[in-house]
Every structure is written in C-alpha cells, then in structure tokens.
Image: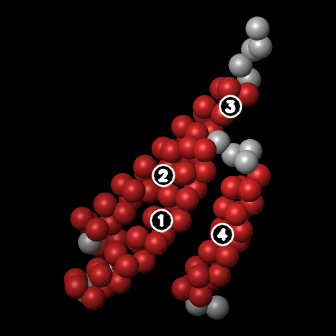
Amino acid sequence: MPKEALFGLSLFPYLAFLWFATRSRQFPKLGLWGFYGTLVFVAITIPAGIYAQVHYGKSLANVDWLHGSAESFLTITNILLVLGFKNATKNAIKPKD
C-alpha cells in the first residue's frame, strides 16, 4: 500500500477520535483545541507540500521557509495540548478545602 493512501486512511481514526473526545466533554478545552489544531496542521501541510513540489521542485522538508512555518504551527498546537492537560491535571489533584 502506498504511503499516501495509508496517510489518507489514517485520518479516519483521528476524526473518530476527535468526534468521541468532543462528545465526551471530559477533555480539557485547551487540549481539545490542540488536537483540532493538529488536524489543521495536516490540512495546511498538504497544500504547502504541493506548492513546494510545483514551485521549487523540492519536497516540503527542503524548502526551509515553508517547512519552518508548518512546524511552527505544529509547535503551537503541541503547546496547547500540554497546557490544556497540565491545567486539567493540576485542577484534578488540587486538595479540597
């Protein structure tokens, strides 16, 4: 199976995960935003990769300004995930007075 097809198929379990996570209402909001941001990262990276291939004749990883921009967005989503779950953990173990 080509890697592109496998990548496309992997989106379905991730979308199912997002659906269940959203419906459960147990995920921290900021963390959920991070998971949705990861999906947006994928949606941004695909056209950026196509642009890099068509305009520069190189893969996305070899066009620094495009690759750096995409990775910066992924870093932001990761920060949202960490902060969301850190806050949720801190609130869950807070001693009750």
**Quadrant of the rendered image containing residue 58:** bottom left
Q: Residue at (48%, 65%) from the top-left corner?
A: 40
Identify the residue under disc 4: 15
Q: Is residue 96 above or below residue 64?
A: above
Determine the CA span between mark 2 and mark 1: 9 Å
Mark nearer the N terminus (4 vs 3): 4
Mark 2 neighbour density, 10 Å: few (under 14) some (14–19) many (20 or more): many
* Disc 3: CA contacts within 10 A as few (<14), some (14-19) or many (>=20): few
Q: SS at mark 4?
A: helix
What kind of residue is marked 1?
Val
Q: Quadrant of residue 21?
A: bottom right
* 3D distance between C-alphas at marks 2 and 3: 18 Å
x and y percentages locating residue 77 in the rendered image: 48, 52
The N terminus is located in which quarter?
bottom right
Which numbered disc covers residue 89? 3
Dot 2 corresponds to which residue?
Answer: 77
Of badges 4 and 2, nearer the viewer stands: 4
Identify residue type, mark 2: Thr
Q: Amino acid at mark 3?
A: Thr
Marks 2 and 1, the one that precedes in the sequence = 1
Amino acid, disc 4: Leu
Identify the residue position indicated by label 1 in the image. 40
Q: Residue at x 41, y 71 (%)?
A: 45
**For the residue labelled by badge 2, is the local secondary structure a helix, a strand or a loop?**
helix
Instruction: Identify the mark at residue 50; answer none if there is no mark.
Output: none
